[in-house]
């Protein structure tokens, strides 16, 4: 059996998805991310692959979608909100642990690839893919091809400041990157929880805030309304720059009720146009869209890649390898 394993390395969970040669799902499992422990994170990913292969009695390729990017200068992880990954040769260490090549790419790029090829953005000229979860990531696909950028940061809208800030939003919450007022500090799950606590004094996680808002809690509803407004401003800035046909949302907060009505109803105020044709849509492949794109990384051309630059690691690497581009012939 020809297998392709995709791993989605998130801030709170690690998910593995196994696809057979025809793209059918054969295996799936999630485990908690060993936060602040790099070695344990590598081991958790490796064990997921080994467990899946033992159950399916077959060996497969491995692709990983991760937060941040692989630096073109050093070959090490940079800009990950899972900060224990930064400065580490994740591609090389995981390849050595599994004794096979692995390929890595930014998690939002994996989402963009999956949704642009045959998801909510299929057929669109420009797709902007957003992860709203522990962090806030973004990926850009143009004509089915992921845009990486000269610095491997294309789409990183989460580390731009909240646009058109109100007086009570300045200077903004401190972000893990060292700056204040970043969109990630406002729009991530922890950012939503922190905003609710600042205003109400109540310490609640994002899912509980959403549940209470649905149940009619006025304070929780007000928190979500502020979040909708900030998300609309952030995406309006993206629309002004990229003018995408589709904005696709993934991550835990992409399932917030009313999101897909409330945000487009607001963003027109800030978009520099007399009308806004851009669609806001949930990922067609749901929570697994990013991990599905990651599975395609290891499969290379056979998986439908159309030019996504990835970091490649092999057990016999002696130095951090350069990035390479996988292309779909024709």
Image: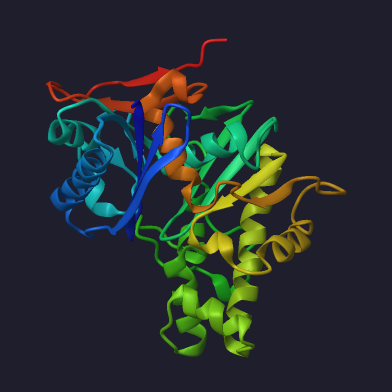
Q: Nearer the viewer, residue 34 or 57?
A: 57
Q: Nearer the viewer, residue 79 or 57?
A: 57
Q: How is the image coloured?
A: rainbow
Left or right, 245 with respect to 102, comes to: right
Q: Hey, which residue is sitting farthest top in the picture?
A: 330
Indicate the quadrant containing the N terminus: top left, top right, bottom left or bottom right: top left
Q: Quadrant of residue 60?
A: top left
Can the viewer see residue 219 in this picture? yes
Q: Position of residue 167 (x, y in %)?
A: 61, 73
Q: Position of residue 288 (x, y in %)?
A: 47, 48
Q: Check the image and report above or below for 288 versus 241.
A: below
Q: Nearer the viewer, residue 234 or 165?
A: 234
Identified at 78% across, 62% down, the residue is 265
Left or right, 43 with respect to 149, comes to: left
Can the viewer see residue 67 in this picture? no
Q: Check the image and report above or below for 44 versus 141.
A: below
Q: Nearer the viewer, residue 127 or 298?
A: 298
Q: Check the image and report above or below for 166 versus 323.
A: below
Identified at 39% across, 29% down, the residue is 297
Identified at 49% across, 21% down, the residue is 307
Q: Position of residue 166 (x, y in %)?
A: 63, 70
Q: Quadrant of residue 231?
A: bottom right
Indicate the quadrant containing the C terminus: top left, top right, bottom left or bottom right: top right
Q: Position of residue 6 (x, y in %)?
A: 36, 39
């Amino acid at each position: 059996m020809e297998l392709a394993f995709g791993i989605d390395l998130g801030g709170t969970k690690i998910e593995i998805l196994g696809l057979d040669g025809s793209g059918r799902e054969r295996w799936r499992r999630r485990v908690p991310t060993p936060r602040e422990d790099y070695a344990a994170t590598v081991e958790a990913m490796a064990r997921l692959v080994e467990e899946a292969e033992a159950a399916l009695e077959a060996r497969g390729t491995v692709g990983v979608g991760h937060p941040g990017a692989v630096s073109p200068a050093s070959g090490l992880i940079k800009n990950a909100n899972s900060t224990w990954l930064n400065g580490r040769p994740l591609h090389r260490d995981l390849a050595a642990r599994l004794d096979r090549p692995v390929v890595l790419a930014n998690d939002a790029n994996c989402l963009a690839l999956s949704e642009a090829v045959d998801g909510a953005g299929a057929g669109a000229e420009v797709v902007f893919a957003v992860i709203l979860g522990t962090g806030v990531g973004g990926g850009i696909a143009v004509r089915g091809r992921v845009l990486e950028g000269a610095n491997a940061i294309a789409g990183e809208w989460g580390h731009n400041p909240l646009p058109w800030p109100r007086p009570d939003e300045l200077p903004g919450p401190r972000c893990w990157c060292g700056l204040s007022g970043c969109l990630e500090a406002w729009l991530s799950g922890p950012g939503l929880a922190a905003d609710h606590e600042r205003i109400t004094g109540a310490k609640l996680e994002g899912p509980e805030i959403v549940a209470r808002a649905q149940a009619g809690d006025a304070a929780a509803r007000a928190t979500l309304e502020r979040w909708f407004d900030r998300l609309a401003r952030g995406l309006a800035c993206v629309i002004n720059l990229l003018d995408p046909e589709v904005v696709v949302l993934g991550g835990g907060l992409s399932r917030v009720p009313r999101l897909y009505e409330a945000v487009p109803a607001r963003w027109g105020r800030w978009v520099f146009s007399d009308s806004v044709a851009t669609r806001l849509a949930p990922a067609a492949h749901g929570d697994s869209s990013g991990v599905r794109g990651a599975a395609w990384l290891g499969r290379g051309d056979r998986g439908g890649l159309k030019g996504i630059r990835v970091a490649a690691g092999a057990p016999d690497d002696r130095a951090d390898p350069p990035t390479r581009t996988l292309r779909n012939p024709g």
